[in-house]
Amino acid sequence: MKSLKKNFGSLDLDFMNEYSDEKIYEIFLSHKGFGVKTVSCVLIFALGRDAFPVDTHVHRILNRLGIVKTSSPEKTFEAVKDIIPKGKKYEMHSNLIKFGRNICKAKNPLCSICFLYKMCEFPDKGIYRKRKIDPNEIKENNFIILENLV
Ligand code: SF4
């Protein structure tokens, strides 16, 4: 933050409205402490752009589904940033977060009620499908993401 203020004279980002997304990534990523996820959040929340932050939920789900085969959220971001339809990036991001918190959880995913089961490439899905689910584990229905995938 200090280096940004030193370079640009303020922390007000309004001047960046003129810049392309690529230019903004370039500027922030040249400063210590910024990663692509943070810059994507700046693009969405401070500048109103359509961006796709990749956190651990998004990274995990896209890998389990077999959409990417990557070893880090940063690599997942690079693999998918240009293939998500324009205007759908933030929506896709937020639905994947909900899906990751409620269905495709890091531990004990609810594979037995997952509507993506057939297309999912997660090797352990069969094991989790047999697991008995406590009804308290189901917080939201699992159709939250459907409209963004079909
Ligand atoms: S089948 Fe299981 S691992 Fe695959 S997306 Fe659904 S919840 Fe996640």
Image (cartoon, grey):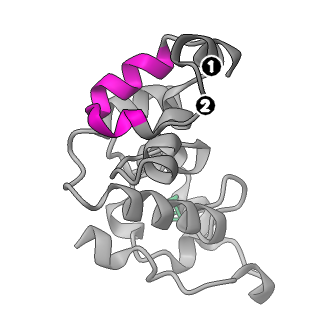
Binning the other alpha carbons within 10 Å of mark 1 as few (below 14), some (14 to 19) or many (20 upward) gives: few
Q: Residue at x 50, y 81 (%)?
A: 142
Quadrant into which the C terminus falls: bottom left
Residue 118 drawn above or below residue 1:
below
Q: Position of residue 22 (x, y in %)?
A: 29, 27
| Residue 42 within the segment the image draws in magenta | no
Whether residue 107 is visible here, answered yes or no, is yes
Residue 12 drawn above or below residue 7:
below
Going by the numbered disc 2, the residue's amino acid type is Leu
Read off the residue under disc 2.
11
Dots 1, 2 in contact, CB < 8 A: yes
Asked if residue 64 lies left or right of residue 2, the reply is left
**Is 143 or 54 nearer to us in this picture?**
54
Q: Residue at x 47, y 27 (%)?
A: 74
Circle 2 — which element?
loop
Q: Residue at x 38, y 33 (%)?
A: 16
Q: Position of residue 143 (x, y in %)?
A: 44, 83
Q: Which residues are magenta?
A: 15-29
Going by the numbered disc 1, the residue's amino acid type is Lys
Q: Disc 1 and disc 2: Cα gap in Å?
A: 6 Å
Read off the residue under disc 1.
5
Asked if residue 24 lies left or right of residue 18, the reply is right
**Is 115 or 92 nearer to us in this picture?**
92
Circle 1 — which element?
helix
Q: Ligand 1: does it lie within 8 Å of the C-beta at label 1?
A: no
Asked if residue 19 lies left or right of residue 73, the reply is left
